[in-house]
Image (cartoon, rainbow, N blue to C red):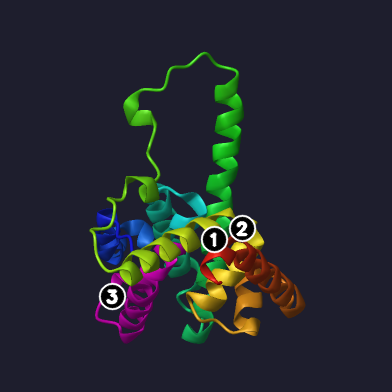
Amino acid sequence: MLTCPALAASATLLTDLTASPQGGAFLSATADPAVQTLNGFLAEVERKAFRMAQMALRHDEDALDAVQDAMLQLARRYSSRPSAEWRPLFYRILENRIRDLQRRRTVRGRIMAWVPWRGDAEETEADPVERAPDPAPGPAAQAEGGQIGTALQHAISLLPARQREAFLLRNLEGLDVAETARAMGCSEGSVKTHYSRAVHSLREQLSEFMT
């Protein structure tokens, strides 16, 4: 499992929110049980949310930005909603933020294609998967398990956005079909279709490990 040191920065997110006038009256009373409940929910989902964003964006800092922005929006706009609604709302906000970042990348790429440019080293971020060190030598089963994990993460990142979203919400976050539909803003039938296609695609891409 890949880890990102930058993810630790999200631990101070609600502290920063509370200290900021933009955080709103709800977060100003940190002793409020409702605030503590929200803090607990965000702490629970942050790592899984980061992994989802990381797979979609393939860039640690962008993924962290997406998760933090989603947390901020949930806290500011929906903190007064019943806590049972937070999970699908949060993941819907997160997916919208991910799509925004992907669109910005596309636009930036089109602009840069028409501008003479020599990218400096700091402008080119290596893929975190590619930068990860090779696994230490070990038993064949351990090596194969690492290969499968890397291959699975890569295969998930190649799925169409809606298929990837459905697959990760169902498997990584453990949402049921109805909750996933609310998070994705679509029908339960669409969730089942996206999920089924994702599973079929992943099986094809990972067939060498399944024989």
Q: Residues within 10 Å of mark 1 (few under 14, many from 20)?
A: many
The quadrant in which the N terminus is found is bottom left
- What residue is shown at x 60% (from left), y 34% (from top)? 107
Q: Which residues are magenta?
A: 25-53
The quadrant in which the C terminus is found is bottom right
Q: Position of residue 138 (x, y in %)?
A: 24, 65
Residue type, numbered disc 1: Ile
Residue type, numbered disc 3: Ala
1 or 3: tag closer to the N-terminus:
3
Residue tagged 3:
29
Could you tell me which secondary element the residue under label 1 belongs to?
A: helix
Q: Main secondary structure of the magenta part?
A: helix
Residue tagged 1:
156
182 relative position to 25: left or right: right
Q: CA distance from mark 3 to mark 2?
A: 42 Å
Residue 148's label in the rendered image is none
Q: Nearer the viewer, residue 52 or 2?
A: 2
- What residue is shown at x 69% (from left), y 73% (from top)? 196
In the rendered image, residue 52 lying in the magenta stretch gets the answer yes
Could you tell me which secondary element the residue under label 3 belongs to?
A: loop
Residue type, numbered disc 2: Leu
Closer to viewer: mark 3 or mark 2: 2
Q: Are marks 2 and 1 in contact (CB under 8 Å)?
A: yes
Residue tagged 2:
159
Q: CA distance from mark 1 to mark 3?
A: 40 Å
Determine which quarter of the picture holds residue 135.
bottom left
Work out whether 185 lies above or below 36: above
Q: Position of residue 35 (x, y in %)?
A: 33, 78
Q: Are marks 1 and 3 in contact (CB under 8 Å)?
A: no
